[in-house]
Image (tube, rainbow, N blue to C red):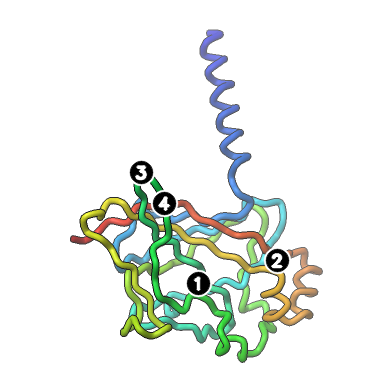
Amino acid sequence: MQKIVTLFFLFVFAFGMSQSKKADVYFEIQQKEVRDSTLLQVKLVNHSKQNIWLALDTIVGNQEKSFLSYHSFFKGRRISEHFEENTAEEKYTMTLVTRSSCDDEAIRELPKIDTFTSLILLGKGESMLFSYLFVLKKGGDSNYLDSKEYVVDTNKKNKYSFSMSYIMDDAWISSNVEPNVVEALEKANFVPYNVVIKSNSIPYISKK
């Protein structure tokens, strides 16, 4: 009996430790693996003790594989992709050509965010699901900045992994969100989340 009690408390302690290590806000990719042209289901979890808001572009139409859409209608910041090769010796990010953020000149010329409808509001303890399209290649000619391509070595087809991250820092907020919107959200007890949000990592499976 004492052994069972001891094991129970060890389990509770281990569970508590795992929970304490969990980030305040994180992405949870629902699939266990990803292939080329996969529409991933991603859960955004607010594990913090605050109500938060984000300018996150979750519109699948802006992720179409035929082009890189950077004219997001509300200037929502994009998710960053991390497509990596894992070896016994090292882990490094693959090289790609991409227009990867909404911070280029064309986006800066768009009006600032001036309405709540452009934002994601997530209460403490809440979560939301959204779709994210992963493809190895977007756009046409890789010589242009509005294209990206990951090169996969089929001899290492079981060595790749995919994860995602997102950051909305204070400088971006002040440049892209109207102050009255920030103030109104503060009055409604919502704070901007300006820490890097990361996801779990899942293996990439080559079709070849």
Q: Amino acid at mark 4?
A: Lys
Real-space CA distance between mark 2 and mark 1, rounded to the nearest whole angstrom:
17 Å
Task: Find out whether the residues at labels 1 and 3 contact each other: C-beta distance under 8 Å.
Answer: no
Q: Earlier in the sequence, mark 4 or mark 2?
A: 4
Task: Find out whether the residues at labels 3 and 4 contact each other: C-beta distance under 8 Å.
Answer: no
Real-space CA distance between mark 1 and mark 4, rounded to the nearest whole angstrom:
28 Å
Question: What residue is rendered at 59% in x and 39% in y?
Answer: 19
Q: Which residue is mark 1?
A: 58
Q: Amino acid at mark 1?
A: Thr
Question: What residue is rendered at 61% in x and 33% in y?
Answer: 16
Q: Secondary structure at mark 3?
A: loop
Q: Amino acid at mark 2?
A: Pro
Real-space CA distance between mark 3 and mark 4, rounded to the nearest whole angstrom:
8 Å
Image spot of residue 115 (x, y percent): 68, 81
Number of dots carrying numbers:
4
**Nearer the observer, disc 1 or disc 4?**
4
Q: Which label was assigned to residue 91?
A: 4
Q: Which label was assigned to residue 205?
A: none
Q: Which residue is mark 2?
A: 192
Is residue 8 placed above or below 20 in the rendered structure?
above
Q: Amino acid at mark 3?
A: Ala
From the viewer's perspective, tell me whether residue 207 is left or right of residue 13.
left
